[in-house]
Amino acid sequence: MKWFKTISNKLNLKNFWKDESAQGMTEYILLIVVVVALAYLFKDKIKAAVGAKTEQVGSDITNFSGN
């Protein structure tokens, strides 16, 4: 049993569960996953909106006269 106590002290398991050093990175990863999932779900609507705006800008440039 002494060996278990020695290993437990070296690992310091209580502090391991309290350690929050990687919490920020995990939150960023989850945020990126949510943004990518939303973009995937609404990809058709996004394509249509961007396509419509691109066509509008293209026609505005074509119709532009320098007067």
Image: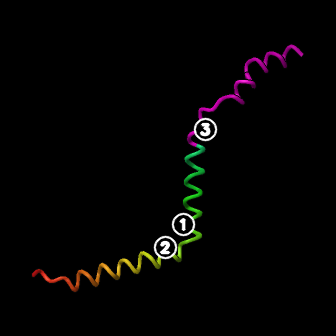
Along the line of sight, which residue is nearer the eye, 36 or 55?
Answer: 55
Residue 35 falls in image quadrant: bottom right
User: Seen from this angle, which residue lies furthest right?
Assistant: 1
- Residue at the spot x=84%, y=16% of the render? 3
Whole-percent x and y of residue 45?
A: 51, 76
Whole-percent x and y of residue 51?
A: 41, 79
Identify the residue under disc 1: 39
Identify the residue under disc 3: 23
User: Seen from this angle, which residue lies furthest left?
Assistant: 67
Along the line of sight, which residue is nearer the eye, 1 or 53?
Answer: 53
Check disc 3 and give the amino acid type: Gln
Label 2 to label 1: alpha-carbon separation? 8 Å
Is label 2 in contact with label 1 (beta carbons under 8 Å)? yes
- Residue at the spot x=23%, y=80% of the render? 61
The image quadrant where one finds the N terminus is: top right
Crowding near the residue tagged with mark 3, few <14, some 14–19, many ≥20 C-alpha atoms within 10 Å = few
Identify the residue under disc 2: 46
- Read off the magenta span: 1-25
The image quadrant where one finds the C terminus is: bottom left
Q: Is residue 44 above or below residue 14?
A: below
Please tell me whether mark 3 sits on a helix, a strand or a loop: helix
- Residue at the spot x=59%, y=63% of the render? 37
- Residue at the spot x=69%, y=28% of the render? 18
Crowding near the residue tagged with mark 1, few <14, some 14–19, many ≥20 C-alpha atoms within 10 Å = few
Please tell me whether mark 1 sits on a helix, a strand or a loop: helix
Check disc 2 and give the amino acid type: Ile
